[in-house]
Image (spheres, rainbow, N blue to C red):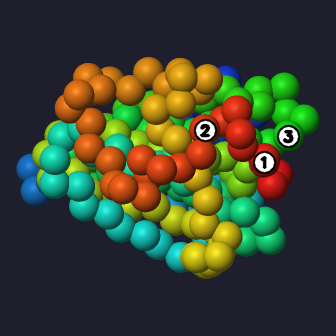
């Protein structure tokens, strides 16, 4: 039996990954990253940094973020407490899915992970209070290359699962550019 299974999400390169989870009376055990097993799934990123966020309120939106070349980042996202609706937006010029998004509900309970290669804007909305998200990236953070898109852009039409009036965003994320004025560096 394979350690992980994958499900493509309709945009080339974006994968929902399911680890094998072993449950018993004590709890569970699972492997979340095994390089040779992920290579079999088509994920060849060499991760160099782990990030961890806590969002206190349900309806917190973080994103849509990405890092521009030459430090563009592939990401592997998972939830260790609570749940999120996780989104990847294709920002690769020339891609047949440029400007389209795909998403999945990730939770501590389902243990699923979302992988997206470089060339995607990433964001998520928390579905429970006190949600913790952990993700790996394959390039270290470079503040001068940190960019993003407006989470509520009508052109992207992301179907966030929380009513607009209940969504919390940072001042920085509320001021990100919309897709119509966006010049993709990819």
Q: Earlier in the sequence, mark 1 or mark 2?
A: 2
Marks 3/2: CA distance?
16 Å
Q: Residue at x 47, y 38 (%)?
A: 151
Badge 3 local density, few (<14 within 10 Å), some, or many (20+)? some
**Vertical arrangement, residue 68 with respect to residue 141, above or below:** above
Disc nearest the viewer among 3 and 2:
2
Residue that carries the numbered disc 1 in the rendered image:
184
Q: Is residue 121 visible?
A: yes
Determine whether the residue tagged by mark 1 lies in a helix, strand or loop: loop
Q: Which residue is mark 2?
A: 178
Residue 40 seen anywhere in this rendered image of the structure: no
CB contact under 8 Å: marks 1 and 3? yes
The span from disc 1 to disc 2 (Cα, nearest Å) is: 12 Å
In percent of width and height, residue 29 lies at 29, 57
On the image, the x and y values in percent for residue 180 come to 70, 32
Q: Which residue is denoted by mark 3 in the rendering?
A: 93
> What residue occupies the far right of the structure in this picture?
94
Is 133 located above or below residue 113 in the figure?
below
Q: Nearer the viewer, residue 129 or 34?
A: 129
The residue at the point 32 percent across, 63 percent down is 53
**Image location (x, y in percent) of residue 152:** 46, 32
Snapshot quadrant of residue 8: top right
Which SS class for mark 2? loop
Question: Closer to us: mark 1 or mark 3?
Answer: 1
- Label 2: few (<14), some (14–19) or many (≥20) C-alpha neighbours in 10 Å: some
Q: Position of residue 161 (x, y in %)?
A: 32, 24
Mark 3 falls on what kind of element? Answer: loop
Instruction: Give the residue drawn at x 9%, y 50%.
Output: 25
């Amino acid at each position: 039996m394979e350690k992980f299974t994958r499900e493509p999400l309709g945009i080339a390169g974006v994968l929902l990954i399911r680890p094998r989870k072993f449950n018993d009376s004590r709890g569970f055990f699972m492997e979340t990253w095994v390089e040779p097993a992920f290579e079999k799934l088509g994920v060849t990123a060499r991760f160099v940094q782990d990030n961890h966020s806590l969002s206190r309120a349900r309806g917190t939106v973080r994103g849509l973020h990405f890092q521009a070349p030459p430090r563009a980042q592939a990401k592997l996202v998972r939830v260790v407490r609570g749940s999120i609706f996780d989104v990847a937006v294709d920002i690769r010029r020339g891609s047949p899915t440029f400007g389209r998004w795909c998403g999945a509900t990730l939770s501590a309970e389902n243990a699923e992970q979302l992988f997206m290669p470089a060339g995607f804007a990433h964001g998520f909305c928390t579905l429970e209070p006190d949600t913790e998200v952990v993700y790996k990236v394959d390039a270290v953070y470079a503040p001068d290359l940190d960019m993003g898109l407006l989470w509520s852009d009508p052109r992207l039409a992301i179907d966030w699962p929380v009513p607009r009036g209940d969504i919390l965003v940072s001042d920085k994320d509320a001021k990100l550019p919309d897709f119509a004025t966006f010049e993709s560096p990819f």
